[in-house]
Image (spheres, rainbow, N blue to C red):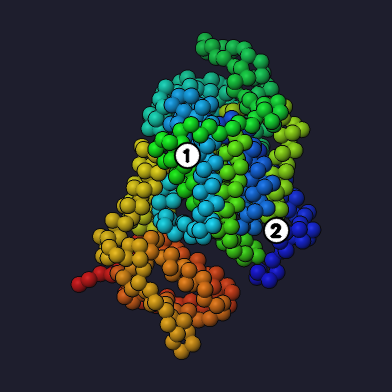
Amino acid sequence: MSLVNAPLDGIPGLKQNWKSDLISGFVIFLIALPLCLGIAMASGAPPMAGLLSGIVGGIVVSLLSGSYLTINGPAAGLIAVVLHSITTLGAGNNQLGFEYTLAVIVIAGAIQVGLGLLRAGNLTVYFPVSVVHGMMAAIGIIIISKQFYFALGVTPQSKSISGLLMEMPSSLAKVNPEIGIIGITSILIIAILGKLKHPMIKKLPAPLVAVLAGMLLAVLFNVKDAHSYTVFNMTYEISPKFLVNLPDKISDGIVFPNFALIGKGIFWVMVATVALIASIESLLTASAIDKVDPYNRHSNMNKELIAKGVGNFALGWIGGLPIIAEVVRSSANINNGAKTRWSNFFHGMFLLVFVLLLPNIIHMIPLASLAGILIMVGVKLASPTEFYHTYKRGWDQILVFLVTLILTIVEDLLVGVAAGIVTKLLIQLYFGVPLKNLFLSDIHFEYNDGNIVFVIKKALIFSNMISLKRDLAKIPQGRHLIIKVDSVEFIGYSAFDFLSDFKRDYERNGGTVTIDGLESLHPLADHSLSSRHRKHI
């Protein structure tokens, strides 16, 4: 479907599509409610922090957003970042750590606004695909290592991620049976619903079904009343501490930032991490959703950065988690027939109404149910198929992926991402990319028999293709474009991935794209987009 037939934007779009957007917004609310609570819990923040993020991300940020169908809210990809900030800055005092982290979020939001104003919407160009995937897989493993114990009602001894992973087998002997049943039921429901292909079942919001089942089991086990029970001569404790604890009024959940650590270096490391990861994830999600937008619309990435920055700046002042454009909820938004950004707005409104009118229902949700939901999110992020697909793209991709993953788990997210990028640059130097071309491209274009010809020399890699992206964006639609790579020493996977997307989009709008000279380059793997280099005899 062409852009000409796209729905109207703004108030006219609301009048035109309110019914479909309202329905989709309600379904996304059902998915988002347990995820907002679970992500807050996993981040070491109060449950209200996640709900505030969903509300502000929907009601406020949707109106400023540069994308059309993305859903804003707290995301699993930021769990590790926020948790690390709270524990590091708080030095054992999680309440104080959360207040310091709110100050981090305020400044990170301001930086995002600045990046948008500086037109840094192409920020993702500087992060190779393998680094991003390695980062997300590491986050998945971190989520699993933390939530495993909540799902089983066990208190771990270890604090480090590697220690938590090593402690998992021995902790199975300490499972609180009734809590474990709730957590495992949640995991099974999401796993089973994800496998069933019936159209009606596919429309069920699996996280909500898991939470409802957990609430029924919590009533059956009388979790709201503190008591003990015995199984096989072992005594276990049950109490409301295993349920979500929410303030009676939304105003009671407001927490203000503490800027006392603003002069410390570690504070600014956290600011850089939150601003960087939140920006990258939002831009990647917007780009991914653009590819499946049935109306072939393209997001304004600079506007998207500004919108997320405004949202995060505001959330830091009131006690909310940082938000991004979240890919799972955004995909569900499209699948449920949303047509404009108003579905995002409606999902935020439904969250607000629910929190205002039905807070007692939230008190009945077991933490183990939320942990089970997050474990399945983690499994998806760190799926063995992700490792396999990365391996199939070439040894250079899997190496960078693993370096990023391992150092993110052993050290932290910023170290892991930096190490992955450095590894990628070293591989490119090994294959003959000149040092000066690591960040500067050697490209010129000319007109030949009415065709537009781009001639690329030396290298086309993730770190030097920003100028090519800008030049290609200026090319009129409907022309014949030739991209010559005869004089290239190395083309990276991320560059191929971009060229493939550009070719698809340009030809969808009536033009043609020919990439000339690929036959002289040798791929590192059988994958169609694998990195290629020139062999010298």
Q: Residue at x 64, y 49 (%)?
A: 61
Mark 1 neighbour density, 10 Å: few (under 14) some (14–19) many (20 or more): many
Q: Identify the amino acid type marked 2.
A: Lys
Whole-percent x, y for residue 76 in the image: 53, 41
Element marked by disc 2: loop
Element marked by disc 1: helix
Q: Identify the amino acid type marked 1.
A: Val
Closer to the N terminus: mark 1 or mark 2? 1
In the orientation shown, which residue stands out farthest toward the left?
537
Cα gap from disc 1 to disc 2, whole angstroms: 32 Å
Give the labeled residue for mark 2: 339
Q: Residue at x 67, y 41 (%)?
A: 55
1 vs 2, front mark: 1
In the orientation shown, which residue stands out farthest toward the bottom?
449
User: Horizontally, is 298 left or right of 429 in the view?
Assistant: right
Residue 4 to residue 348: above or below = below
Mark 2 neighbour density, 10 Å: few (under 14) some (14–19) many (20 or more): many
User: Horizontally, is 322 left or right of 127 in the view?
Assistant: right
Q: Quadrant of residue 187?
A: top right
Give the labeled residue for mark 1: 81
Q: Which image quadrant: the C terminus?
A: bottom left
Residue 477 visible in the snapshot: yes
Residue 329 visible in the snapshot: no
